[in-house]
Amino acid sequence: MPLINEKRLDEYIRSVKEPYEKSLECLVEIPTVSSDPACKQNIRKAAALTAGILKAFGVQAEVLMTPGHPVVIGTMVANKKHRTVLIYNHLDVQPADYSQWDQDPFKLTIKGGRYGGRGTTDDKGPALTALFAATYALKQGVPLNFRFVWEFEEEIGSPNFEKAIRSRKTLLHAHSILVSDTVWISRNKPAIPYGIRGLLTASLHLETGDRDIHSGLAGGAARNPIGELCKLIAACHDPATGRVKIPMFYDDILPSGKKERRSFEESGFRTSGFKKAHGLKKIRFEKAAQVLDAIWLRPTFEVHGIAGGYRGPGIKTVIPQKAEAKISMRLVPRQDPRKIFSQFRAFVKVQNPDIHVRREAFLDPYLAPTDGKHLQAAVDAMQFGFQKRPALIREGGSIGAVVSLDKLFKVPLIFLGLSLPEHGYHAPNEYFEWTQVMGGIRTFAHYFERISRII
């Protein structure tokens, strides 16, 4: 007889709407921007608050301090003989440019079941959803124990995560891992990824003088560092196709099979919906197969900013003394970010030996098997939760903690994300929705009962 009764589950979900919103409000209203040194005390405050939220649910919580930002871990043990699920989420967020938001990004707004604010969908809303679901599963007698790992450095590449978790490896030992930090294909098509891309970030620096100089006095003879960085960037990749031109960049890529590509094409992905969700007026490709290849199967080279010279109103005709560019590369299975960085640095040296390349972060790609009982349980659970069969996909983003957790525990790892493309990961006016919370709690509760029988 099933332990999760659908009618009782739906009654529980309705009953927790207000406490869910209060908890989300507490989390959103602390600016946990991990990339901003000024937010360090905010993040420590949020870690203490998070531990308090976990304790209110009966979870034994601990704040692990690191050389950077803390990690909060929690244990919920019903019976030491039961198997254990480790649930990972992150509570740090991207910066928010107030000028681009219609509201204060660090004040939760609730309008018709929509929760606005930085971190609502990435990843504070899904984290709370999983917590409410695990609590319900235990109350219904599902024979599992739970470990929670809530990180505050995911948005900067998880530099201290692995060491912190390794220090509590015995305590956090689990038989299965659940990650809820991924995005569906569209509102109408749930998605379960089995692979994510890795990441390499770097900054390029060029200084050609002691000070900015008048272009009428030295222009034509003086070097322009912004122009030279632009020339290098153009040599690195083709902006029309996105193809990277760094030698040997594609040598180690794991080729995809026809079956995988066919599965992607049958997933319900639509280019028009993709453009609308992300606010894109034009893209490089219009065919769905080409877009999917670009965002899931191929590596990237992106430029995120170029700084240097005069940036005020009007034009000040000076040649800047220095310039900086910020770049990243999303990498696919078998590409090693360390090897790619060495190739990139060597390429830059040949193109312009005066440009200094500074490494920022490395994250390895991750690819899981596309079969197995855990994945089938996840598919069935999401169909139960949202009344729609999910697509099995890869995802273009990166989660450094996933690679660390896989390395440390070597157990099945499942992605059950709840975010939609239009929710605005890393974008202005980010939001989450109560409908995703409802379906998420249903999904997680069903998944926990299913895997309690197989792990």
Image: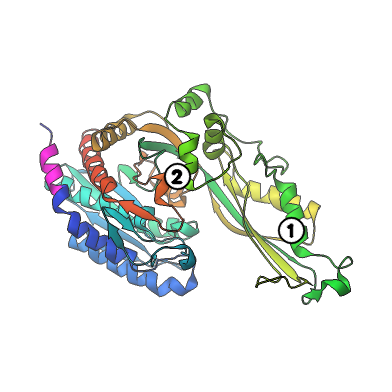
Apparent side of residue 357 relative to residue 395 in the rendered image (left or right) = right
Q: Spatial distance from mark 2 to mark 1, Cα to Cα?
A: 32 Å
User: SS of the residue at dot 2?
Assistant: helix
In this rendering, the answer to whether 389 lies above or below 225 is: above
Q: How crowded is mark 2: few (under 14 residues within 10 Å), some or many (20 or more)?
A: some
Residue 372 on image: x %, y %: 35, 29
Residue at image coords 44%, 63%: 101
* Residue 229 tag number: 1
Apparent side of residue 7 relative to residue 426 in the rendered image (left or right) = left
User: SS of the residue at dot 1?
Assistant: helix
Residue 122 on image: x %, y %: 39, 54
Q: Do the residues labelled 2 and 1 touch (CB within 8 Å)?
A: no
In this rendering, the answer to whether 272 lies above or below 355 is: above
Residue 185 on image: x %, y %: 42, 38
Q: What residue type is labelled 1?
A: Leu
Give the residues drawn in magenta, as a range: 3-12
